[in-house]
Amino acid sequence: LAQVCCRLGCGWPCIMAGLFKGFTPADISGQNQPKSSQQRGIRSSILEAYPRLEEALDTIWPKKAPVIVAKCTDHRTLLVIDGDVLFFQIWDNPWAPTLKLLHKYPSMLPKFQADRGAVKFVLNGANVMCPGLTHADAALEDVEAGRVVALHAAGKENAMAIGFTVMSTAEIKDKNKGIGVDNWHFLGDGLFKLGPLS
């Protein structure tokens, strides 16, 4: 994993590529059941970040379902609902859905389609460079910097990764160099392989 200059404003270098590459249950340092008010706050922030999820949220997160927040190493947090890890958070960034949840509700995130040449790198945890998003095979929804997005491979229905935009769509197309999207979680990483938590 490559260390890069922090883009989160904390002033420290941090790992922003393949955040769950090599992740195992041993990386979970503690679990707690949040108070009702904390659960409402988390639920509200998820709905604010992903308004497309409004109609499905009661199915994903039933009101009586047990909720656990699992703190992990390297400033990662998991949201466990009824035993299943459905969302994760990096530092104080927005809660992001796991790929397993995204595959059930694929329209919840803006879609970024990378070119075919980027796929093997993304599936190894690499961030997505701007040229991989401006190629003829690529297609981007219009979003600002600092948004959670679904990363797709050309011709594939399901997302291959979940990323966080370093630049807006307009900047990615205009600059066409540097990192366009941080790769937070990808098919086959430790979070994807993680089973239910009790």
Image: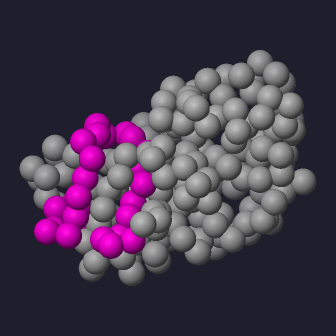
Q: Is 153 located above or below residue 98 in the figure?
A: below
Kindly identify the residue that appears in the image at 23 percent across and 58 percent down: 139
Image quadrant containing the C terminus: bottom right
Q: Position of residue 164 (x, y in %)?
A: 41, 49
Kindly identify the residue that appears in the image at 27 percent across and 79 percent down: 117
Q: 97 or 166: nearer the eye?
A: 97
Q: Is 45 located above or below residue 27 in the figure?
A: above
Which residue reaches farthest right?
198
The quarter holding residue 194 reads bottom right
Q: Position of residue 72 (x, y in %)?
A: 72, 53
Residue 64: tell me if it is visible: yes
Q: In the drawing, does residue 149 fall left or right of residue 99?
A: left
Q: Indicate how the structure is coloured in the image.
A: one colour
Kindly identify the residue that appears in the image at 35 percent across and 52 percent down: 111
Q: Position of residue 81 (x, y in %)?
A: 78, 44
Kindly identify the residue that appears in the image at 32 percent across and 56 percent down: 112
Count of marks overlaid on the render: 0
Which residue reaches farthest top?
37
Residue 92: tell me if it is visible: no
Q: In the drawing, does residue 192 fall left or right of residue 169?
A: right
Q: In the drawing, does residue 174 fall left or right of residue 50?
A: left
Q: Is 54 located above or below residue 71 in the figure?
A: above
Q: Is 63 located above or below residue 14 in the figure?
A: above
Q: In the drawing, does residue 103 fall left or right of residue 9?
A: right
Magenta-colored span: 130-156
Any magenta on residue 152?
Answer: yes
The quarter holding residue 59 reads top right
Any magenta on residue 117?
Answer: no
